[in-house]
Image (cartoon, rainbow, N blue to C red):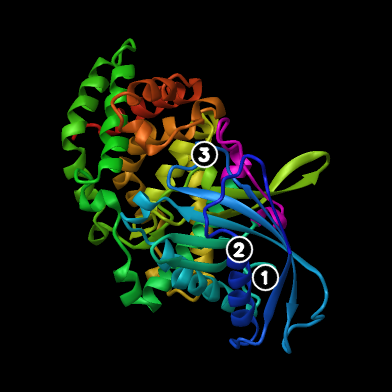
Amino acid sequence: MCTKQAESTLLPSYLNEDFIKDTLESHFNGALDGSNNNKVEILECQFERATAEGENFCSVIYRAKVQFRLHGADAENSNEKREITVIVKDVLREIAELGSNELAMYKHVLPEMQKILDHAVEKSEIGDAAAAPKFYANCYFCERNPREIYVLEDLYDADYRSMNRFVGLDLEETKVVLEKLAIFHAASMKYIEKFPTESAALMPSTLANGFNEDVFFNAIVVGGITAATKVVAEWEDFEEIANKMRSSVENFDAWAKRVMRPERCRFKVITHGDLWANNVLMKYAIEDGKRVPQDAVFVDFQMDFVGSCGYDLNFLLNTSVQLDVLKLHRYELLRHYYAHLKKTLEILGTEELDIPSWQVVMEEVRDLELASYYALACELPLCCMDRQGSVGLTLNSLIDPTMKEETRKKMFANKRVLEMLRYGLDRLNELGVLDL
């Protein structure tokens, strides 16, 4: 047995060969026949950090490259040397204590949603009749005891790659993501129908319950809007918008509680809840010497909740899509999403009267423009932090009085952020969204 670790990687004490061995044995025994006959022999295990410092607020992500043998009566080629790469997601303790739906998502919701799609594939009605659309990484192991840990398929091995969060998604990338989001939402609607008790047990959005008692979320929302207001107040012809933004700080919590209630929704989906470029991996193909997006999968399911499709759509468009694409193609993109939502629901056997109309979807998008405002003022500046500015960045950077002013200054020094704010806030003002 040989363990290697990158020089700059400081591993938690639990993350070692024994942990990986137990994880793989649990996975293979369950995957093969549910017995305990299969044993894993670790030959080599190499650990490294999978994300750069400041790339993820809520967890530390490691990559483990493992060489092993699988011994047992049910294992084919028992002595053959095998290789696997897994991602280990270790949720920060202070975040884990707040609670999330991620454990429930990986243990039940996502597998059942996948089964719903797989069943359609068996009837050759969706996908390529070989595999159902994939929208998440397989989970080999997860627990909350007391650490919250996930061991996941490394999607890089399947040729999925991170997108450029600094530049934003182009038109074709956005269409691929929206197609997958439509499939995700459609499958979730069938899940809610099939598992009403489990769906009702999912935690609501933080915004739906109010965030004033949540120190971290309060720092993101109130701190973000306040900082954005200071920037906007300096712009010519934006005095009216700046004044409305000041008022919104006081009214945002009540506004969010009213708009985010799942009872308000005309139809309900399970949202991703944090759908921006870093939480999407893309598979590309080379066609005529040009890189073309082919498929997208989602990662990080901490913020999922039962609610409106409008939340995910507005959040994605305002954090992750290039400005020119938004200006020229917003309704084309929403139409693209709707076409795939409707098509998938039809394939999954939804009665025509139960399929939301285009008008109903657009009403959800309009009602959830709150998410556009929140995304622009509070999340976009975080999403666009450059790598140098992200070094050492944590949630505490937004709370600590000695750090938060400098952190906010860096966040709002970004050209893309400022251009998106100018366009987005002007648009939201015209729609009356800022008139709280």
Which stretch is magenta?
155-174
Helix, strand, or loop for circle 2?
loop
* Image coords of residue 22 (percent x, y): 59, 72
| Label drawn at residue 131 | 1
Other-residue count near label 3 (Cα within 10 Å), few / some / many at <14 / 14–19 / ≥20: many
- Please tell me how many numbered marks the rendered image carries: 3
Which mark is nearer the camera, 2 or 3?
Answer: 3
Q: Give amino acid for label 1.
A: Ala
Q: What residue is shown with label 2?
A: 134
Report the Cα–Cα distance between label 1 and label 2: 8 Å
Q: Give amino acid for label 2.
A: Lys
Viewer can see residue 139: yes
Classify 26 as above or below 393.
below
Q: What residue is shown with label 3?
A: 55
Report the Cα–Cα distance between label 1 and label 3: 32 Å
Residue occupying the point 16% across, 36% down: 251
* Relative depth, front residue between 274 and 76: 76
